[in-house]
Image (cartoon, rainbow, N blue to C red):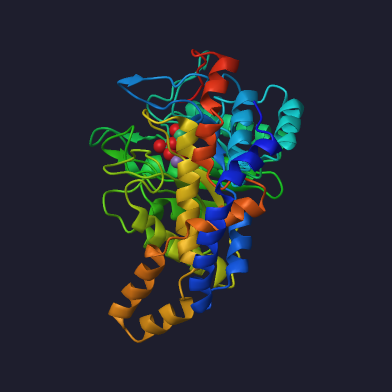
Amino acid sequence: MRIAETQIQEQNSLLINDHKKSFEQLAEKLDKKNVDISLILERLKDFQIAIPSWALGQGGTRFGRFSVGGEPANLEQKIEDIGLLHTLNASSGSISLHIPWDIPDDAEKIKSLADSLNIKFDAVNSNTFQDQPGQELSYKFGSLSHTDPAVRKQAINHNIEVIRYGELLGSKSITVWLADGASFPGQQNFRKAYQCTLGSLEEIYQALPEGWRVFVEYKPFEPAFYSTVINDWGTSFLLASKLGDKAYTLVDLGHHLPNANIEQIVAILMLQGKLGGFHFNDSKYADDDLTVGSIKPYQLFLIFNELVEGMHYSDSKPELAWMIDASHNVKDPLEDLLQSVEAVKLAYARALIIDREKLWQCQEENDVVMVQELLQDAFRTDVRPLLAEARLQNGAVIDPVGAFRSLKVRDRLIEERGAGSAATGL
Ligand code: PSV
Ligand code: MN
């Protein structure tokens, strides 16, 4: 299914008058605060967040999975779904593949389909957390950190194979997330596991093609419940530093112990030039993978406050990889992704309107009250008309979720693919 240009115009014609009014009101308000609206619009228009190939089907828990129907049954259909999202929001212009869930059998065909939908290939992801049918050695007790060099070799080779698939499609980075760890004290020798992991990552690093980067993702627990080998940003930073300047830390918002100050982690990683990218999601308890911004939107805003400072107000020009990494079992996954992308952009837009000179001045003067006033004034500003205007200027719709519903996208996908069509992934 594709959404036609005329359908977009029809959708927008119903909302355009109200939108123009609210945009003008907001523009007037921001203008008085000396906010450069056209610069912000350009930044919002350029901002693209990758959609993971594994989040397009209904997510499940270990207790069950309830299909939404019309799920993409293969990589082509997944790319088509992302095409629908991108048509609606003009911000989902890339896909992040998880191998072997989404092996591109015919890379040229996949690439030209993606090109036709204006979709690029973001970081590729390896999977050494599951054993695949026919796989020689098991990852039950780890992969890159395994005690047996043969298992480590198999996992290294898998990562190199993932890089090769990425190369065929035009990706420029690989994200390594390890499930390796221990569920019981004493099960794993921390020092040896760390050293083996570093050695394995060094081999993967050596295989990086020209212009490629490797992102090292960390996570404090799950599926291992006592310890994980790359448990926190410090360990990831250490590994990335030892590997070299093509290695970076990747921050997944759900991969922190409760109340961790993620914005501070982000600030320091950026200062050190080692922040590679983000996996966005939200959580109440742990790695819940809920819709971005659904639980802690203020935290997301504070993270973007640091990102804006690092991206737009420092000499380093970090090239960051943005991706949604959320999936759960109640919402339509496409509507959920539209909401997640919107939440990320809202946080970005709010952080962009902060009066930064004033913020720095108040910080210097230790004016704690005024700092809070400034931050919360930006956070409480309804910037949704800015996002809608950016979409409009990019040829997309004013209200993505509204358009998704009124165009009956899910019904049409069910008609096309069937109610039983299910996506691969977790
Ligand atoms: C692990 O929890 C993770 O965040 C990693 O990024 C995986 O690759 C992804 O989720 C999908 O399982
Ligand atoms: Mn992740």
Q: In this view of the protein, which residue sits in the foreground, 333 or 35?
A: 35
Residue at horizontal 39 percent and vertical 64 percent from the top: 379
Residue ID at (59%, 30%): 81
Task: Choose top left, top right, bottom left or bottom right for residue 361.
Answer: bottom left
- From the top left corner, tell me how far across and down residue 161 is, in percent: 63, 30
Please, which residue is most extreme toward the bottom here?
A: 365
Q: Residue at x 51, y 30 (%)?
A: 54
Apparent side of residue 340 relative to residue 321 in the rendered image (left or right):
left
Quarter of the image with the N terminus is top right
| Rendered-image quarter of ligand 1 | top left
| Along the viewing direction, whichever of 338 and 112 lies nearer the viewer | 338
In the picture shown, does residue 53 fall above or below 36?
A: above
**Can residue 320 be seen from the camera position used here?**
no
Could you say which is closer to the camera, residue 363 or residue 242? 363
Above or below 416: residue 42: below
Q: How many marks?
A: 0
Q: Position of residue 423 (x, y in %)?
A: 51, 21
> Nearest the camera: 96 or 139?
96
Quarter of the image that includes the C terminus: top left
For the question of whether residue 390 can be seen, the reply is yes
Q: Is residue 261 left or right of residue 6?
A: left
Where residue 237 appears, as percent x and y from the top left, is 45, 55
Q: Residue 293, image x and y in percent?
A: 39, 49
